Amino acid sequence: MKVTVVGAGAVGASCAEYIAIKNFASEVVVLDIKEGFAEGKAMDLMQTASLNGFDTKITGITNDYSKTAGSDVAIITSGIPRKPGMTREELIGINAGIVKTVSSNLLEHSPNVILIVVSNPMDTMTYLVHKTTGLPKNRIIGMGGALDSARFKYRLAEALEAPISDVDGMVIGGHSDTGMVPLTAHATRNSIKVSEFLSEERLAQVSEDTKVGGATLTKLLGTSAWYAPGAAVSSMVQAIACDQKKMFPCSAFLEGEYGLNDICIGVPVLLGKNGIEKIVKIELAEAEKAKMKESAEGVRKTNSLLTL
Ligand SMILES: NC(=O)c1ccc[n+]([C@@H]2O[C@H](COP(=O)([O-])OP(=O)(O)OC[C@H]3O[C@@H](n4cnc5c(N)ncnc54)[C@H](O)[C@@H]3O)[C@@H](O)[C@H]2O)c1
């Protein structure tokens, strides 16, 4: 499997590193617009190969898409990240132009590629790729829910004072501070609902901490996070590479599912060799349905800022 990562910044490099360490891809090409930057990141990462025990070949290139030819999966991380106090939605002006050009360049050299969109505001960038590339919907996947769910599990484990491996949970909805819908009623510790162990107030706090998970890190780091985003992307790419049919909440183009149409938003999907193999429909509680509807309204508001 050949994987291209566009953007050799914090998130792009972390994606390349985790994909290589997991050793399922033969080749990872990292591309950036900044002269020599991707080459430098790739060389540094390749010098970890003997230490970390992987055989994936990582190469870096400056803006030459011919070197990405024949990619099976491409990850779009190019664009600006937010600074403390900013929302993801504020990035739309610059990132929309970048994502549009990058996806068209990728497809020119890899017509069969599966695209994973990471750049923010991610649901709107995923929608933009749908509207501008005409690719079938199974081949355009937005990464947000996999990361938000990892943050949810971290917060649940913290509240339960339990190891994270005891905990399961999922976040659907828009990838924004107000749009995320942590499914607290479905979350479990060793198959027991977490509501058996945590008060309603504590669970509400877990939800809030999850929703501002990105903003909390941006405030601490001065830029947005990269380790967990890279790990989330690498798990999704592995599910595709190994045809795992593994379930992740991903931003997918909806045509009636969850009562929504003509929108990309986080819902549970199965990832396998064809990208999105299936959108999984689960029964939501009334409160969760209302939150999902509200979340979709927020995503549509950001989508309306696009010039398609
Ligand atoms: N979806 C998520 O869960 C999630 C999580 C974290 C970050 N993000 C988003 O990912 C994006 C990248 O974040 P980062 O922290 O890696 O930023 P960064 O600034 O560290 O890296 C971005 C890289 O993109 C490159 N770039 C810019 N324009 C380009 C172009 N036209 N072609 C190729 N490369 C180009 C830049 O040179 C830079 O190296 C941001 O939009 C951020 O908000 C999304």
Image: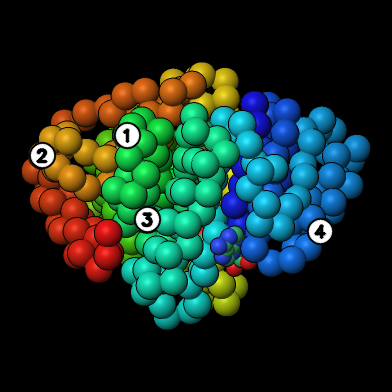
Q: CA distance from mark 1 to mark 3?
A: 14 Å
Mark 4 element type: helix
Q: Which mark is residue 40?
A: 4
Whether pointer 3 and pointer 2 mark residues with C-beta atoms closer than 8 Å, the reply is: no
Dot 4 crowding, Cα within 10 Å, few <14, some 14–19, many 20+: some
Q: Which residue is mark 1?
A: 137
Whether pointer 4 and pointer 2 mark residues with C-beta atoms closer than 8 Å, the reply is: no
Q: Which residue is mark 3?
A: 125
What count of labels does the image hold?
A: 4
* Three-letter code, disc 2: Gly
Q: Quadrant of the C terminus?
A: bottom left
* Three-letter code, disc 1: Lys
Ligand 1 resides in the quarter of the picture at bottom right
* Three-letter code, disc 3: Met
Earlier along the polypeptide chain: callout 4 or callout 1?
4
Q: CA distance from mark 4 to mark 1?
A: 34 Å
Q: Which mark is residue 259?
A: 2
